[in-house]
Amino acid sequence: MPQVITTDSKSEAIRADGYIITVDLDKCISAGPCSIAAPLTFLLRDSDGKAIISDPDGDTLEAVMEAARSCPILAIIIKDKTGKTIFP
């Protein structure tokens, strides 16, 4: 299983396909649409309701992208395998 690194300010993981998912926890407002769009990838933390990555490969890349697009404050950053930001 891929390693997920979660600190006070971010939750980050690299998918098996090389895409990097980062949740900016300083920006996250616990709205939760990401956990609906990609429920196996994003989990709302019990302590504060912020979105953290549970399994970066849990959902398709398309679902993860939809989750990133659904975030009202764009707290989810997606980079391709070269490190280039593809969203937002």
Image (cartoon, grey):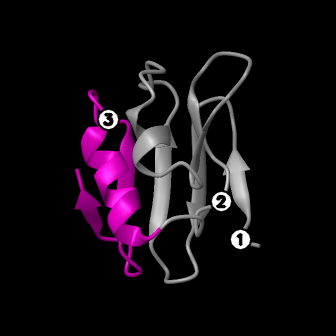
**Residue beneath disc 2:** 55
Query: Which three-letter amino acid code belongs to the residue tagged 2?
Result: Asp
Q: Is residue 80 magenta?
A: yes
For label 2, the SS is loop
Circle 3 packing at 10 Å, graded few (<14), some (14-19), many (20+), is some
Residue 44 position (above or below residue 10): above
* Label whose residue precedes the other's in the sequence (3 or 1): 1
Mark number displayed over residue 71: 3
Residue at 45%, 73% in the rendered image: 19
Q: Is residue 62 magenta?
A: yes
Query: Which three-letter amino acid code belongs to the residue tagged 3?
Result: Cys
Mark number displayed over residue 2: 1
Residue 32 on image: x %, y %: 45, 28
Query: Which three-letter amino acid code belongs to the residue tagged 1?
Result: Pro
Label 2–label 1 contact, CB within 8 A:
yes
What is the CA distance from the residue labelled 3 to the residue labelled 1? 23 Å
Q: Quadrant of the N terminus?
A: bottom right
Q: Is residue 38 left or right of residue 45?
A: left
Q: Between label 2 and label 1, give the one nearer the viewer.
A: 2
* Label whose residue precedes the other's in the sequence (3 or 2): 2
Residue 33 on image: x %, y %: 39, 34
Q: Is residue 23 left or right of residue 75?
A: right
Residue 12 on image: x %, y %: 58, 53
Residue at 32%, 58% in the rendered image: 65
Residue at 41%, 25% in the rendered image: 27
Mark number displayed over residue 82: none
